[in-house]
Amino acid sequence: MEKRAVLFPGIGYHCDKPLLYYCGKLLQDEGYQVIKLKYVLPDLDIKNNHDQRMVLFEEACLQVQAQLCQYDLNDAQELIFVGKSIGCYVAAKQRVKTYKKAKLLLLTPLIETLTMNIDGAVIFSGLEDPWVNPAILRQKAQEQDVKLIQPHGNHSLEVKGNYHGNLKRIEEVLDALKEMM
């Protein structure tokens, strides 16, 4: 059985950082071929600028399409996309456009991700994430068929000085990923 998974990183949050690293390890252990994407993106001020974020999202989407065309993802019997931050938007857009059967695990998505059909997704977003308003995220999530998990944590789902809690949140993400398989 062909099982494939794609890791969609964020800006500065590559596939060797904890959330994506351990998701990739779990997926490999479960027999998935794991594809780790990379982008080379312009340095834009995107935090409070929707238009600049959209420019960055679209550039990342173009780079991802060029990378994914090497794989027969639609032939996979199981397909999971794991996105982090801007990677959530890119993963969701790829699913909407091309890979309709992909399951989505979205880690700290930006709000634009929820403008697409992400039904069935599992979302983790830290309550102290400065990149998204938790109440707006909750409202947008309620409009779709998604599972939203909002633990304490920042944009990396971490709480400064709470190492045991940070590891526990990684474990919660892995448990959710395991349920998706």
Image (cartoon, helix red, strand yellow):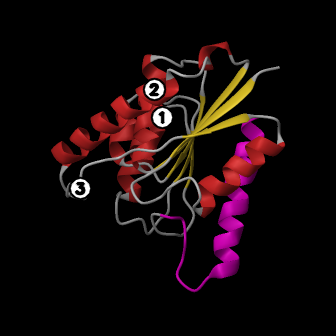
Where, by quadrant of the figure, is residue 134 drawn? Answer: bottom left
Q: Position of residue 147 (x, y in %)?
A: 59, 42
Residue pointed to by mark 2:
94
Residue pointed to by mark 1:
91
Q: Position of residue 38 (x, y in %)?
A: 46, 44
Quarter of the image with the N terminus is top right
Badge 1 crowding class, 10 Å Cα cut-off, few under 14, some 14 to 19, many 20 or more, is many
Query: In the structure shown, which secondary structural element does the residue marked by tag 1 occupy?
Result: helix
Considering depth in this image, is 18 or 178 the residue closer to the camera? 18
Is the magenta region chiefly helix, strand or loop?
Answer: helix
Task: Say left or right for 160 vs 59.
Answer: right
Give the residue displayed 69% in from the left and 56% down from the top. 22
Furthest residue in direction bottom, as rendered: 161
Q: Position of residue 42 (x, y in %)?
A: 24, 50
Mark drawn on residue 7: none
| Label 2 – label 3 distance at C-alpha | 23 Å
Considering depth in this image, is 165 or 66 the residue closer to the camera? 66
Residue pointed to by mark 3:
43
Where, by quadrant of the figure, is residue 45 drawn? Answer: bottom left
| Marker count (numbered) | 3
Q: Is residue 72 visible?
A: yes
Q: Amino acid at mark 3?
A: Asp
